[in-house]
Amino acid sequence: MDELYQQLLEADEQSYLRIEGQIMTEWEKSGSPAMDLLLRRGKEALNDGAPEVAVEHFTALVDHAPNFAEGYYGRASSYYDLGLLGPALDDIRQTLVLNPRHFEAMRGLGSIMMELDRTADALELFELILTINPQSQEAKDTVDFLEIQLEGQAL
């Protein structure tokens, strides 16, 4: 993983998405076919618009593989879709405890901070993403947007 993160730091605008994808693929490897199946079912339920079903799959994954960050991240996404910000925040926290370089969890947390009008906190998170993934266009655009928002608040 360290090599992939180093490649991401050195990536250009054309290659960073490919490397991002490789990192995310590695994140999804639990080392257990049964846990991989729970992850896949949870993601499918989430993609099918059934976050309550996804929560069940991700909870089973977290129960059986408590050191696997993707279980918490998937459940956080499911909770968020259900409008349950407290549980979503708790699972994002645990995702980042287990995988401090999880830029997708940081993005999710940053989006929640924006939703809660915590602009400075959101800006800090998106700037942190850029220290890991400096070519992320979404993070760059969000930083620009948040900086303008904060400048407007300072006036």
Image (spheres, rainbow, N blue to C red):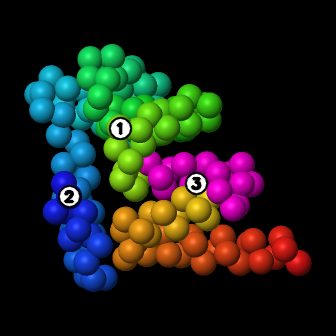
Residue 110 against residue 52 in the figure, above or below: below
Tag 3: amino acid: Ser
| Identity of the residue drawn at 56% across and 37% down | 89
Query: Which quadrant holds residue 74?
Result: top left
Disc 2 is placed on an element classified as: helix
Res 49 visible: no
Marks 2, 3: nearer the viewer: 2
Q: Earlier in the sequence, mark 2 or mark 3?
A: 2
Residue 155, how many percent across, how many down?
A: 88, 78
Tag 1: amino acid: Leu
Asked if the residues shown at circle 2 and circle 3 are in contact, with their CB atoms under 8 angstroms apart, the answer is no
Neighbour class for label 2 at 10 Å: few (<14), some, many (≥20)?
few
Disc 1 is placed on an element classified as: helix
| Identity of the residue drawn at 36% across and 53% down | 101
Magenta span contains residue 139: no
Distance CA(mark 2)–CA(mark 3): 26 Å
Range drawn in magenta: 105-121
| Identity of the residue drawn at 41% across and 38% down | 97
* Mark 3, residue position: 111
Q: Earlier in the sequence, mark 3 or mark 1?
A: 1
Residue 20, how many percent across, how many down?
A: 27, 63
Residue 62 against residue 47 in the figure, above or below: above
* Mark 2, residue position: 2
Residue 40, how many percent across, how many down?
A: 24, 35
Disc 3 is placed on an element classified as: helix
Q: Which mark is residue 121?
A: none
